[in-house]
Amino acid sequence: METQFSRALAGNGSSERTAPEIISGTEGTSETLWFLACGFVENRTGKNGKARVPQTVAETREFMAPALDLLKDWPINFDRHVSSRWNAGEGQTASQRLGSWYRALMHLKGDLASCLQERCQQVIRERCGDLYARAEPNSEPDWLSAAEAARRLGIRSDRLVDAVASGKIEGRQTTTGHGHRHTVISTKCILDIERDRDRFLDARETAKRLGVSKSQLSLLRGAGVLRELSLEERPPLIDGGFDWALIETKVHQIAASSEGMPAPCQTITFNQLTLRRTTDRSALFTLFRQIFDGGIKPVSIAHGDRLGDFSFAATDIEKALESAAETVMTARDVSRVTGWKYECVTHWCAIGLLPASRTQRGSSEIWLIRQKALCEFQATYAVVADLARAMGTSSRAFSAVLEAAKVETIGAKRVGETSRGRLIRISDLARALSKLTAEGTPAA
């Protein structure tokens, strides 16, 4: 082979095969030997890996001798060579420490190349301590670089680096003499993160799997039947807050409760239960809770397990909406109807005197007050300003009368040096009037 190879490279002699043919005919062995030999030759720039083509058999033997020595006493000489190159390099990984020699070796083909590659990986793993080295030649690595793990998860690598630095996930970080920080993450940890990212979904994907719109998904959240985890509650590096495993289990329970359609009837699919059907948000919330609690059962399950495609009897839906319907007003509606100042109404809501619920409407938060709650409020409290107006006096003067009668006022909102929205319990006012009457003193 030395003679054939030398003649082919020199381009003379009676050889009928070219160098590429020799290489190809030996399944890359000659190419691998050429690579090993070139590693011992330095060119004028001081870099190895580039060599002048030998012109004679003698030159070929001299050129190939170091490469053949690596293969003697296998694998002792080759192991020493890999360790020597490792110790001469800088960095944390095989690619950094062994440089272009390692990268070129990993690209070679053929039986000899495969044997050298496998042995090189074993030396790196057992003797050199490369965190990225594979546990077995064809197995998954125990550790992944931040860049590789980021590509696998589809996120930015800096998020992984920060998560390791903060101790949120298992990983290791080392710093080179040049100040560069290398981060590796446990493969097991990455697998756990992949499972969590498959389980916890964002609003868009959750709505798609349920077969509902994002606005209806928002209504389901408002009703309390679906919950989105806060950022603090989510596992590390998870963008979505909806636990699909729990949601899917609940949807299957709703599907399993279906008793079928006893007789032909008009139906309504779940994805039609929106504010277009009823403007009463509270009634819609009550309806969703009844469905998720099993009080209202679907009569037909179509198109797999998508909740939005479940059909319900129209009579069941309308009956539930009617029973849940109740006039609900905003704080501004109450202010307009009663003549009370808007800021007083919201203040009473905030301190709990006027029962109300707070919700989002567009970009603003508003107070919603049920008609029943407003009636109970008016039956319990009287507004001092309303009483003073009815008696033809000022609120300040009437408050002085109440204070003299030792009648307590509550619910006032401080505005600078004055106050607004004073309330008096009707029961306290009745007791004060009763006392004045018993004493024979006319009420002021």
Image (cartoon, rainbow, N blue to C red):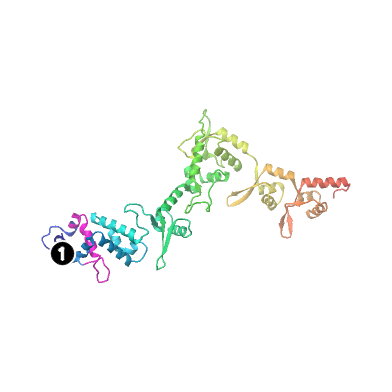
Q: Residue 274 in the image: x percent, y percent?
A: 55, 41
Under tag 1, what secondary structure?
helix
Q: In the displayed image of the protein, which residue is found farthest to the right?
A: 440
Question: With 90 as the anchor, is 217 left or right in this view?
Answer: right
Quarter location, residue 135:
bottom left
**Residue 429 on the magenta segment:** no
Q: Using a 10 Å C-alpha cutoff, classify the residue at mark 1 as few (fewer than 14 neighbours), some (14 to 19) or many (20 or more).
A: some
Please say whether residue 56 is visible from this viewpoint: no
Residue holding disc 1? 10
Q: Examine the rendered structure and indicate whether residue 200 appears above or below residue 162.
A: above
Q: Position of residue 234 (x, y in %)?
A: 51, 51
Question: Could you tell me which residue is drawn at 57 percent across and 40 percent down?
Answer: 289
| Residue 198 locus on image (x, y percent) | 45, 48
Residue at 60% over, 37% down:
321
Q: Amino acid at mark 1?
A: Ala
Position above or below: 299 against 220: above
Q: Is residue 45 magenta?
A: yes
Q: Which residues are magenta?
A: 22-51
Q: Choose between 121 and 24: the one closer to the eye.
A: 121
